[in-house]
Amino acid sequence: MKFDRSRFHIPYAQKLTLLASVPLILAVAAIAVLVAAQSRALADREITALETQLIEAKKAELRNYVTQARNGFYFIYGSAAPDDEAAKRRVAQILSAMIYGEEGQFFVYDYDGTAIVSPRETARIGQNLRGETDSEGTPVVDRLIDIARKGDGYHSYLWPKPSTGVPARKIDYVTSFPSWQWAVGTGVFIDDVLATVATSRADVEARVQRTFLYIGAITLTALLVVFASSMLLNLRERRLADAKLKKLTQRVFDAQEEERGRVARELHDGISQLLVGVRYALDNARRRFDRGDPAAGAPLAKGIASLGEAITEVRRISRDLRPGVLDDLGLGPALRTLAEDFGTRTGIKVTYSTVVFRNRLDNDAKIALYRIAQEALTNIERHSGATEVNIDLRGHRRGATLRITDNGTGFDHRSSTQGLGLRNMQERMDQLGGRLYLRAAPDKGVEISATAPLSHMLPPDPGSAETKRPDTGKAPV
């Protein structure tokens, strides 16, 4: 089965849209990642602050419990000797009775590691628990005794909850009874704090994911809107382009038909009549020769003269269609010949001037300026009623400018700009990237100015000396 790539061809405008969408997608993705990172960082700081605040509150609560308990039996401990066993038993009984909440209790270890008080875990009482660790390997009793020896402090570790038997994070606060060598403290499980923190982190992650989804949905919607707008705009532009193409095609056909009609009229009115006259003259001369008439040479001479006129007319028509002098000598001599022929044919006085710049226009510019001059002279002959025409061609730093002025009746700008000839002029300059100006002349008539850009000027030949002086007809432009 042969793969048909034409079915999957993407139009150029849609390719541009897709290409323009890539930076948008990358930018939105970068923004989403940045927003997510910033949100997570901010949430982590807030959650850490919340966790610290809750744990500090727990620690303060533990310290307060121990302080209150110590104040409750300090009258016993303060007056007892280090070896007063009765006082120790009374204090141990008081601490054993101080049970609070579902998990709260006081514990007592001597410096040797023996458990003295543990009301919720009575099996531990009397056992030496030195070396005991939690499930993570963290020392428990040894660390509590070390903290008590130094005064007081906190210790965190994993420990089974008495109510459930499930290991949970616990914080103990322990202080010292130095004369009895006791480590006395209490603890609280902070699994509720950790659960709160975990819930907060889960909420943050859910919010971040929702943010990603929202950004993705907004981006997708924007891309769909852009793509749909591009499609609609592309369809609209294509319709306009098709309409303009049809209009341009029709104008090309009109121009072709007009040119064919002009050539046909010239052939019929000029060449055809001349050739008919030549035929009659030759027939007349033949008949006279057949009769032996000595005056047979007169119609023969007339036929030869008419044939010469026909040859001249053929050359004129050929020159109008494509002047050979334009290719051989350049634009300057071609315009000079055009001006002289126009003046001879119409009786209008034509003045032509230029400066020498050594045939430096490329072929497109020469043809365009020559055709503009042809069209302008045709309009002057048909519509202006002018008696004088001035044609000026010169090069400058911006390119080359052809300026044609007449002293005719002027023009109606609104109606004249709709003519096919003026449209052809404008289109030729548009193809060159040049400019065409049509304005009223300073005194009377019309001034047409066509400028070919510098990009259509060829570089000068090395060693050529270019001087600006009025053209004498000897140097090509």
Image: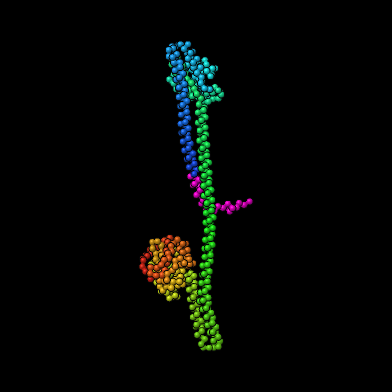
Report the front residue among 207 and 25.
207
Check the image and tell me how it is coloured.
rainbow
Does the magenta stretch mainly form a helix, a strand or a loop?
Answer: helix
**Residue ranking furthest to the right:** 1
Looking at the image, is 209 positioned above or below residue 63? below
Q: Position of residue 46 (x, y in %)?
A: 46, 33
Whether the magenta-drawn stretch holds residue 47 is answered as: no
Q: Residue at x 54, y 81 (%)?
A: 279
What residue is shown at x 47% (from left), y 14% (from top)? Answer: 91
Query: Considering only vertical position in the picture, is 432 above or below 107?
Result: below
Residue drawn at 36 percent across, 68 percent down: 469
For the C terminus, the image quarter is bottom left
Q: Position of residue 164 (x, y in %)?
A: 56, 24
Q: Which residues are magenta?
A: 1-27
Q: Nearer the viewer, residue 250 or 314?
A: 250
Residue toward you, 302 or 18: 18
- Image location of residue 40, percent across then percent down: 48, 36
Q: Quadrant of residue 432?
A: bottom left
- Residue drawn at (47%, 31%), measured in percent from left and top? 50
Q: Is residue 163 above or below residue 337?
A: above
Tell me which corner region of the image, top left, top right, bottom left or bottom right, holds residue 167: top right
Number of marks present in the image shown: 0
